[in-house]
Image (cartoon, rainbow, N blue to C red):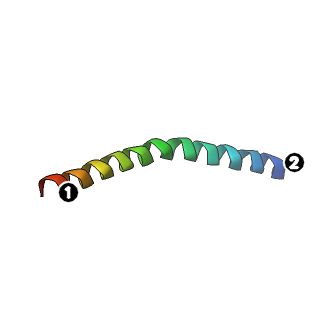
């Protein structure tokens, strides 16, 4: 019983972590690409 509840909570935690980190990853990729392109273009 407790093991099943723990598994469900673990799955929910994993899903929440994924949803929370996805926007930050997208922002990091955006800013990383922008800074890289400005470095190449205007240096």
SS at circle 2: loop
Between marks 1 and 2 in the image, the one whose residue lies nearer the viewer: 1
Packing grade of label 1 (10 A; few <14, some 14-19, many >=20) is few
SS at circle 1: helix
Please report whichever mark, 1 or 2, sits nearer to the chain's N-terminal start: 2
Packing grade of label 2 (10 A; few <14, some 14-19, many >=20) is few
Direction from residue 11 to residue 36 in the image, left or right: left
Q: Locate residue 40: give its quadrant.
A: bottom left
Are dots 1 and 2 in contact, CB under 8 Å? no
Circle 1 residue: 40
- Residue 20 in the image, given as x and y percentages of width and height: 51, 42
Direction from residue 22 to residue 30 in the image, left or right: left
Direction from residue 13 to residue 38 in the image, left or right: left
**Residue at (82% x, 52% y) in the render:** 3
For the C terminus, the quadrant is bottom left
- Total numbered badges shown on the rendered structure: 2
Direction from residue 27 to residue 41 in the image, left or right: left
Q: Which mark is residue 1?
A: 2
Label 1 – label 2 distance at C-alpha: 58 Å
């Amino acid at each position: 019983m407790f093991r099943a509840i723990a598994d469900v909570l673990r799955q929910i935690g994993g899903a929440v972590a994924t949803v929370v980190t996805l926007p930050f990853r997208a922002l990091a990729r955006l800013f990383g690409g922008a800074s890289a392109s400005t470095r190449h273009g205007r240096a």
